[in-house]
Amino acid sequence: MASQRILIVEDDPAIAAFVQTALEREGFGIEVVEDGNRVLDRVAATPPDLILLDLMLPGMDGLQICQAVRRRPAYIPIIMLTAKDDEVDKIVGLEIGADDYITKPFKTRELVARVRAILRLFHHSAESGSRGLRFGPLEIDLDGRSVMLAGNPVSLTPKEFDLLALLASHPNRVFGRDMLLEKVWGYDYMGESRTVDVHIQRLRQKIETDFHEPRFITTVRNIGYKFEG
């Protein structure tokens, strides 16, 4: 089986070399691009299995690149690398389609764990056979990993789908944010509960008629969320 390919987009040679060495040691195939303007050409020529994308780049910045990659028909997981501590930058990255972020400086163990968790999630296939869930106008094909709302397809990221599938498979069960992080992002995920909130917000915008007054995914104050069956 061919190794999974990761495109590192980072203009700091020392950081790029550190990340490349760490991931090649784990068996990944690596390509490094330093200039944001070259990223889309490389993605079009040979789509990687995952992109590690620095936020601050010469040419196109990380947010612009993320938006452009998300306009492509084929989904590529993106982990953003940022030296900024500003929560706004992290949330904006998630809202425009990044799957995760890592704040510099980071340890090798954290980097590898995040990469493996995202790739495991992206290539996850349903384990329980061909099953479907239906709640009024909302249809969820667990095996085909597709969602329909009132007969129209709903475009979800892999992580959004897994979050929805978990909640909808256990209607009326309350899930805490830490449990959702463990179940959807993986037991070795080292993220923040705010990540769950952002993905729930994006899900509501896609499947709720009025996401300010959600019908399907409701908030349980001070605990987490549940799916109303």
Image (cartoon, rainbow, N blue to C red):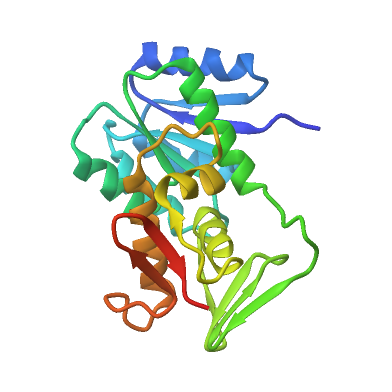
Looking at the picture, how far across and down is residue 205, in whole percent?
36, 71
- Residue 40 in view: yes
Quarter holding residue 6: top right
Looking at the picture, how far across and down is residue 123, in whole percent?
67, 47
Q: Nearer the viewer, residue 176 or 78?
A: 176
Residue at 58 percent across and 63 percent down: it is 165
Residue 138 lies, with reference to residue 40, above or below; the image says below
Residue 170 lies, with reference to residue 28, above or below; the image says below
Looking at the picture, how far across and down is residue 120, in whole percent?
63, 41
Residue at 53 percent across and 87 percent down: it is 137
Residue at 35 percent across and 45 percent down: it is 193
Q: So how many labels did they put on this image?
A: 0
- Residue 48 in view: no
Question: Is residue 195 rendered to the left or right of residue 175?
Answer: left
Residue at 38 percent across and 26 percent down: it is 10
Q: Nearer the viewer, residue 192 or 73?
A: 192
Question: Is residue 16 rendered to the left or right of residue 25?
Answer: left
Looking at the picture, how far across and down is residue 160, in whole percent?
49, 59
Q: Nearer the viewer, residue 60 or 79?
A: 79
Question: Is residue 43 rendered to the left or right of residue 129?
Answer: left
Q: Quadrant of the N terminus?
A: top right
